[in-house]
Amino acid sequence: MRHGRVYFMGDSAKVVSPFGARGGNTGIADADNLAWKLTAVLKGRAAPALLDSYNEERHEAAQQNVMVTNRTARFLRPGSPVEKTFRTAALGLARQHAFARQFVNTGRMAVANPYTRSSACERSGGQSVQNVAFQWADGTPGRVNDLLRWADGRLLVLVFGATSPAALQRLGGLAETAPVRAVQVLGPTEPAGALEHVRDPKGHLQGACHVFGHAWALVRPDSYVAATGESVDASLVHAVGHALGAALQEDEE
Ligand SMILES: Cc1cc2nc3c(=O)[nH]c(=O)nc-3n(C[C@H](O)[C@H](O)[C@H](O)COP(=O)(O)OP(=O)(O)OC[C@H]3O[C@@H](n4cnc5c(N)ncnc54)[C@H](O)[C@@H]3O)c2cc1C
């Protein structure tokens, strides 16, 4: 989806069957993926090599979406006698048996495709974060999208639960030297440390996505998780560099 300085997105990059609302939705996801990377590179916050991850991530998504929508199209208009037999059997069974209704494929709705082979996401990352609710430190309600706006194009580090003063100091230092904003996500009674913090009285943030069982999550401006980790140490610093294309550049050299 990248040819030199030309990037393809939306229907110019791929065309999917119009079942499951995947064409327009994934076109917007393409733009969401590329926009923050271009901005970061143009502002000198990320290495140009980060732009290669656009194709890695969105080409994988395009392949998934073409496969899923093609399956629906072939269920609706079988392409072979075998597919027609399968459809007839599925429809017949579905009238009487609930288990067979999952085989009636009139469209699988668009999803935030996971990235499993991106060189800008660590193995622990690549999933989209849901726009779940929390409370700002002053008690006003907020959502993850508000946090991303607050991060203003930088990476967002979510640190979960009580954290040692040394780790908080390290995070403060990281936020001064890298394009990162860090926020501590606390339960209703946990004491706040020397860092911006939000309250999570209903376990929304921890429960929203399985990655939030970890000590920290590094979230990108397109609301994908770049990496998660078990402690605030050098692994976080490495993950920040990786998410900004630094490791990609080193690999190329
Ligand atoms: C029947 C149907 C139902 C659909 N339903 C859904 C749905 O429910 N949900 C969903 O998410 N998606 C749906 N889609 C898919 C969705 O409409 C497309 O994926 C989406 O519109 C693609 O957007 P795009 O901006 O990439 O391309 P386009 O919408 O095709 O925009 C390209 C634009 O470029 C212009 N253009 C072309 N050549 C030039 C040129 N040389 N110079 C200047 N301008 C040019 C065109 O006029 C056009 O305005 C559906 C598609 C169909 C056909």
Image: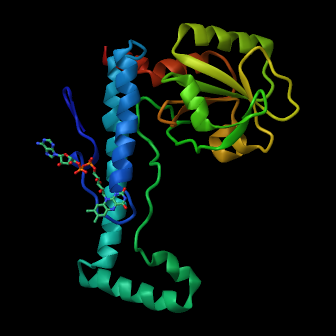
Residue at 27% x, 79% y: name it. Answer: 78
Is residue 218 in view from this perspective?
no
Name the residue nearer the viewer: 10 or 146.
146
Question: Is 65 displayed left or right of 191 in the figure?
Answer: left
**106 sits to left or right of 220:** left
The quadrant in which the C terminus is found is top left
Question: Which residue: 55% across, 7% down?
Answer: 177
Is residue 80 at all visible to an observer of this figure?
A: yes
Taking depth in this image into account, of 139 and 85 the one nearest to the observer is: 139
Residue drawn at point x = 64 percent, y = 44 percent: 132
At which x and y percent is residue 218?
A: 58, 28
Q: Indicate the quadrant containing the N terminus: top left, top right, bottom left or bottom right.
A: top left
Q: Quadrant of residue 140?
A: top right
89 relative position to 122: left or right: left
Residue 176 coordinates in the image, percent (x, y): 58, 8
Is residue 59 shown above or below 252? below
Relative to 69, residue 6 above or below? above
Residue in the image at 20% along x and 26% along y: 5
Q: Position of residue 35 (x, y in %)?
A: 37, 30
